[in-house]
Image (cartoon, rainbow, N blue to C red):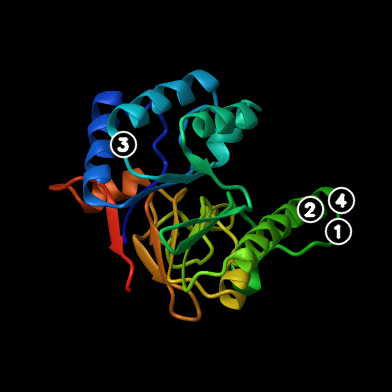
Amino acid sequence: MRLAALGDLHCPRTPPDVLGPLLGRAAQEADVLLLCGDLTDRGLPDEARVLVKMLTASVRIPIIAVLGNHDYDAGEASVIRGLLSEAGVRVLDGEPVEIAGVGFAGVKGFCGGFGDRALQPWGEEIIKRFVHEAVDEALKLESALAKLRTSRRVAILHYAPVESTVKGEPPELLPFLGSSRLEEPLTRYPVNVIFHGHAHGGSPEGRTRTDVPVFNVALPLLQRIYPDRPAIRTVELPS
């Protein structure tokens, strides 16, 4: 199975005459298209409708997506999810899905930092709620992974589960680009590959502590590293 992945479409800030052909090319190169959040720019339903129009016009393969922080900005995330679902996109928020013997688990994720420098749940109540949000997202991911019975498994996130793929961003931003709490369920329930977005200025590839490949597929990053080819990350799963 060939997977095509990209995130941070920021539709319609990324012009439809750029995004539409890119989505069509991804559909030609792969068996499944993965969209790693920030599908809209300001979280507006009308923006999602523009994206849906492009997807239905140019993509004939299964599409699996997670939402990103921009998709929540206007408080209309449930509407955006509904519009995408009506168009046949499987939008994951702690649910698993299986396609042709491959299992997919996805969540938005959250921030909080990495390793020993991750924010801890003590002090003011607002700090505890912040950390608990990251924990809740990790628990949703773990629940989805635990339900999969396939030998090949793929994780789809918006926020990064490892620090290596956000490096390149300003150091002060790193705690807001992901959380190592998301890596914990990916260690307990091994996957073949992990995709995320969000870190436009990060690094394209990294590894978990168990040596699973992690790909940052934020569209601005892919456009930077692939200046002479379509800004799509394609990965072929082993048999």
The image position of residue 95, as x and y in percent, is 61, 52
Kind of element beneath mark 4? helix
Q: Which residue is mark 3?
A: 59
Neighbour class for label 3 at 10 Å: few (<14), some, many (≥20)? some
59 sits to left or right of 112: left
Q: Quadrant of residue 45?
A: top right
Are discs 4 and 2 less than 8 Å apart at CB? Answer: yes
- Type of the residue with mark 1: Gly
69 sits to left or right of 138: left
* Marks 2/3: CA–CA distance: 42 Å
Q: Earlier in the sequence, mark 2 or mark 3?
A: 3
Q: Which residue is mark 4?
A: 125
Q: Which residue is mark 2?
A: 127
Are discs 1 and 3 less than 8 Å apart at CB? Answer: no
> From what the image shows, is residue 46 above or below residue 151?
above
Q: Earlier in the sequence, mark 4 or mark 3?
A: 3
> From what the image shows, is residue 8 above or below residue 152?
above
- Type of the residue with mark 3: Val
- The quadrant the N terminus occupies is bottom left
Q: Which residue is mark 1?
A: 123
